[in-house]
Image: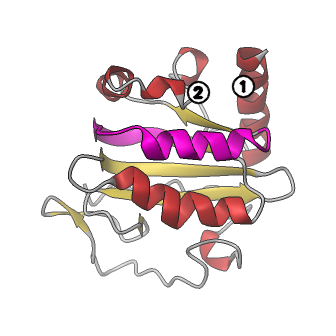
Amino acid sequence: MHTIEPYYNWRGFYIASEDIQSPFFERIYSEFEFTDSIYNFCIHPQWDNIGSPSLFIKILYAEYDSGIAIIELFGEWNDVINNDIMLFKRDIAEGLMENGISKFVLIAENLLNFHGNEEDYYEEWLDEVEDVDGWIALVNLRPHVQDELNNYDLDYYFLMGGELEEVDWRTATPQQFISRIEQYVKNRLD
């Protein structure tokens, strides 16, 4: 697991630790010390800890003028034991929303498992972003993770599936990727 690192080719466009509005502003990363782990497996030190023992993230891009953030997920989303949605919503999403972010693209190809519980925080998050014409999209979910989200009826709160199942985003710039996702969202919501 320590070899899976967050996507780094967009660092020329955005670095969360250099963004004063980011929850990770002025965070210092080590390339040599592995301080975090998921179930006793060390993970790459570039992932950001959100207070969950199993879910880590990386804000790859945030554009406050257009109100969009791209966040890569890593690990296991566990609402049963860790209430990860509460941690993510309260400590990450709300801070970004206070600064104008209302559209969230969550890249979930490294989300290895999902364990759902209740819908309250998902509903609250969607209500808050919809009030300002926002949305939450999950991109590149693993099939078993998508099935789990569907089993808990969380597909109501996220745009997912269809064209969002296999998006080739690494070959695009952040703006190209955002344009693709926004076009998909527009088509889906119309």
Q: Is residue 56 left or right of residue 79?
A: right
Q: Start and end of the magenta stretch?
A: 108-133
Residue 51 location in percent, x, y?
A: 35, 69
Residue 113 location in percent, x, y?
A: 27, 38
Q: CA distance from mark 1 to mark 2?
A: 8 Å
Q: Which residue is mark 1?
A: 185
Rendered image: mark on residue 159? 2
Q: Quadrant of residue 65?
A: bottom right
Residue 171 location in percent, x, y?
A: 65, 38
Label 1 secondary element: helix
Question: Which residue is at a point 62% across and 67% down the rendered structure image?
Answer: 95
76 lies above or below 86 = above
Question: Which residue is at a point 33% across and 80% down the rendered structure image?
Answer: 32
Picture quarter with the N terminus: bottom left
Q: Is residue 109 magenta?
A: yes
Question: Which residue is at a point 30% across and 81% down the rendered structure image?
Answer: 33
Q: Quadrant of residue 124?
A: top right
Specify the amino acid type for callout 1.
Answer: Val
